[in-house]
């Protein structure tokens, strides 16, 4: 262990002192916080460009009831579609044509635009036409005071969601926050495992091509060398990760207080069990529920600890395989075929991640969160939704036991591969190396 520690310290010091490490450690969280600020700013902005739409109403029913909505302005036109198509009126966004049978044909409305249309615009126009058609159909029943009745019965509902734990305690939950957390943490595991696992492989190839390994293995065993490199680079990753977490939490909290101070105060009131501010719209209530969950220390601590445990386990598991690949080749070009069996499970995990976010307790998410090749990503996608303790313990145990077994197998490849030059081994030869006895 003393030699492994020396190698790990060497790998750690060599990488931490590089300018690239310092630059990426500083710039990456700044970019993340900047992205958060940009998202909040963009969400708060509206498109102020007016869109004038000429209406050709062949039914004579829709046009009189259309009303301007936001930046969308309607103007009835006596010209035909063909005439306006030839003339192309200046400053007009598009032409809305209503067919005679709009009351019976749901495809009786057509929008022709002079530029690419947007989903928001199409939904706003379709929503107005839908309401007008429904209102005209209701009028046929000749119900007295229909408008007043409809206004009185319109009741927006904000669904408050709580999760009942195994001990019967009810806690606030937010499906939106769980979805975002599942995607972010799963993506981070994927990126970190690929990035730092590849770093181990590149380090082995570089030392092997420079003949440095021949000198090093005269003092240490190949297995000790591999473990030292893996642990050293893992320490680099954890150091960088902890710096980012602290920076993002502090800066992110400041950003939320600046741009969403009222909602943060409402979230604190929700956590304290006091009354919520009156007159809050349903969308704001959903945001407050999400922020309330975000300020739950126990929830956040569970996610952070889970991320560290699965990041370390996933990294160690895959880094040992990357080290074996690096020892088996002389340059990075030769690693492509050998990396394929390593990267395929990671890619599969990323696709299963989508299913796990939609059904975190389904059979697909359950089994893939136990399989060591995919559990680091899939379990992190399930954790924000809440996972039974025995599943987490079983998943972690399988992951770390598999890491020990993988290190043992990868060590056999590593022992032979670091002395092989000028030849790219086949998968058959790699399996043969695993069977060698020492």
Image (cartoon, helix red, strand yellow):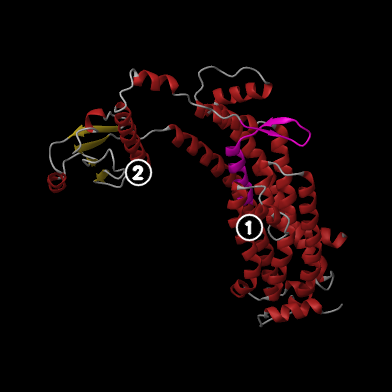
- x then y, percent, for residue 34: 52, 40
Q: Residue at x 70, y 36 (%)?
A: 299
- x then y, percent, for residue 378: 66, 52
- Secondary structure under the numbered disc 1 in the rendered image: helix
Query: Is residue 181 in the magenta section?
Result: yes
Q: Give residue 349's mark.
A: 1
Residue found at the very far front of the displayed protein? 141
Q: Is residue 186 left or right of residue 136?
A: right
Identify the magenta region.
161-188
- Secondary structure under the numbered disc 2 in the rendered image: loop
Q: Quadrant of the C terminus?
A: bottom right
Examine the rendered structure and indicate whether residue 399 appears above or below residue 112: below
Q: Earlier in the sequence, mark 1 or mark 2?
A: 2
Q: Is residue 25 left or right of residue 282?
A: right
Inspect this view and state whether residue 104 appears. yes
Q: Nearer the viewer, residue 412 or 70?
A: 70
- x then y, percent, for residue 175: 60, 38
Instruction: Identify the residue position indicated by label 2 in the image.
Output: 118
Examine the rendered structure and indicate whether residue 389 appears above or below residue 366: above
Q: Give residue 274's mark.
A: none
């Amino acid at each position: 262990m003393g030699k492994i520690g020396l190698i790990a310290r060497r790998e750690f010091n060599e990488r931490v002192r590089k300018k690239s490490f310092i630059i990426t450690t500083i710039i990456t969280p700044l970019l993340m916080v900047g992205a958060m600020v940009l998202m909040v700013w963009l969400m708060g902005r509206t498109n102020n460009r007016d869109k004038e739409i000429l209406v050709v109403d062949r039914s004579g029913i829709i046009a009189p009831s259309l009303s301007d909505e936001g930046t969308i302005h309607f103007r009835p036109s006596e010209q035909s579609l063909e005439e306006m198509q030839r003339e192309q009126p200046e400053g007009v966004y598009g032409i809305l044509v209503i067919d005679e049978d709009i009351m019976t044909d749901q495809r009786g409305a057509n929008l022709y635009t002079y530029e690419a249309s947007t989903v928001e615009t199409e939904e706003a126009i379709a929503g107005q036409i839908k309401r007008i058609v429904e209102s005209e159909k209701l009028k046929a029943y000749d119900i007295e005071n229909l408008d007043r009745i409809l206004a009185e019965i319109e009741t927006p509902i904000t669904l408050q969601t709580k999760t009942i734990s195994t001990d019967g305690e009810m806690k606030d939950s937010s499906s939106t926050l769980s979805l975002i957390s599942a995607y972010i943490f799963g993506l981070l595991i994927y990126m970190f495992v690929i990035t730092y696992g590849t770093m181990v492989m590149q380090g082995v190839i570089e030392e092997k091509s420079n003949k440095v390994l021949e000198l090093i293995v005269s003092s240490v065993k190949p297995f000790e060398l591999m473990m030292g490199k893996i642990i050293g680079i893992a320490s680099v990753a954890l150091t960088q990760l902890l710096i980012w977490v602290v920076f993002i939490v502090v800066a992110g909290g400041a950003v939320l207080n600046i741009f969403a101070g009222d909602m943060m105060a409402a979230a604190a009131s929700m956590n304290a069990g006091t009354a919520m501010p009156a007159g809050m719209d349903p969308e704001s209530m959903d945001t407050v529920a999400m922020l309330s969950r975000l300020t739950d220390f126990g929830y956040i601590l569970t996610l952070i600890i889970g991320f560290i445990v699965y990041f370390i386990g996933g990294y160690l598991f895959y880094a040992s395989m990357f080290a074996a690949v690096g020892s088996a080749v002389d340059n990075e070009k030769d690693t492509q075929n050998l990396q394929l069996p390593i990267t395929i499970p990671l890619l599969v995990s990323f696709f299963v991640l989508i299913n796990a976010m939609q059904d975190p307790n389904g059979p697909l998410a359950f089994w893939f969160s136990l399989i060591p090749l995919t559990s680091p990503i899939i379990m992190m996608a399930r954790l924000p939704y809440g996972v039974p303790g025995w599943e987490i313990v079983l998943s972690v145990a399988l992951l770390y036991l598999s890491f020990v077994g993988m290190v043992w197998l990868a060590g056999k490849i590593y022992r032979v591969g670091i002395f092989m030059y000028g030849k790219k081994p086949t998968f058959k030869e790699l399996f043969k190396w695993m069977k060698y006895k020492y």
